[in-house]
Image (cartoon, grey):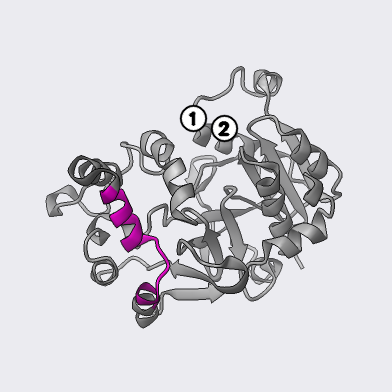
Amino acid sequence: MQTWGVVSTIKAPAASILRWAAWHLEAGAHRVTVYLDDANPAAQAALRDHPKCRVRRCDDGYWQRQHGKRPDAHQSRQTFNATHAYARADDVDWLVHLDADEFLVSDQPVASYLSDLPADVLSARTRPMELLAGSDVARDAAFKMFIPAGKQRERIVASLYPEFGAHLKGGFLSHIAGKVFCRTGLGPVKFRIHNVFLGEEMNPGHVEIDDLHLAHFHAPDWDSWRAQYDYRFSRGAYRADLGPARPRDRGGITVHELFSIIVEDSGEDGLRRFFDEVCTDSEDLRARLAAHGLLLTTRIDFDTVLAKHFPDSAKI
């Protein structure tokens, strides 16, 4: 059975960092590597003491040694660190870069999917599914699933989200690209957020793993989504330089433009109306998703895996 590792650059409370690490340890990760984007002594100590975890604090000294200076954009810090981890990933067969709100979910061990891939497959993609906001994840986590590209995608999205769906890629508020596992030992591999490069070649020997899902907790509830909205609007997932869901000549606008229009027209009430239609868990939305085969429900018991892998985390 082939081994795999996961890497992330994280700025979050210690409990959230350890929850992310514990989930992937439980999923079978042989190595969990965390780059701390900000000082977090509690998380650093807990990760350092776990035999399958590596942790690096990305302070000014780290960036001076590795890069000359700290990159301004968090995306640049993420990709630099993922590439840095890959160059040192000599104890796993595969490495994937995930964000702190992304969790691998599958019915089979992750390693079984990777072990079944032919030797000429060098990169493998897992597509995302977005959590419906307000789900009780430990008992009944509900996710909207990825819709493959094709002529039916727009029609399906419009039926799911009649007011705002036309301006959302695949009906998702965040990315639909997913994340990529890369075989280790290939040489000068560089990670990007949603792709890997071997020299000039993007995603060499690429396949998609259909039954391995990337559970994205992008908007777990209104309060946490609203707290992150301003940053995402200016510098993150809703920033102005990202493209529209459909071509401009077919009326496409970016999510940044959509939110600008919503706020100008309706302010906070408009944002809440958007959130309720696109993100909020409800029987009606579950039924619409299920009718298209796009609803996945499962249990994600973070508390149990956290207590198992970091038994002292309750003291943090």
Q: Position of residue 74 (x, y in %)?
A: 52, 33
Q: How many marks?
A: 2
User: Which residue is labeled 2 in the image?
Assistant: 77
Q: Residues within 10 Å of mark 1 (few under 14, many from 20)?
A: few
> Which quarter of the picture shows residue 104?
bottom right
Q: Is residue 281 magenta?
A: yes
Q: Nearer the viewer, residue 153 or 41?
A: 41
Q: Position of residue 310 (x, y in %)?
A: 81, 53
Q: Is residue 52 magenta?
A: no
Q: Position of residue 173 (x, y in %)?
A: 38, 54
Q: Is residue 132 left or right of residue 122?
A: left
Query: Relative to residue 57, is residue 166 depicted above or below?
Result: below
User: Which residue is labeled 1 in the image?
Assistant: 73
Residue 7 visible in image: yes
Q: Residue at x 48, y 68 (%)?
A: 143
Q: Residue at x 40, y 42 (%)?
A: 229
> Which quarter of the picture shows residue 264?
top left
Q: Residue at x 37, y 58 (%)?
A: 172
Q: CA distance from mark 1 to mark 2?
A: 7 Å
Q: Is residue 97 left or right of residue 44?
A: left
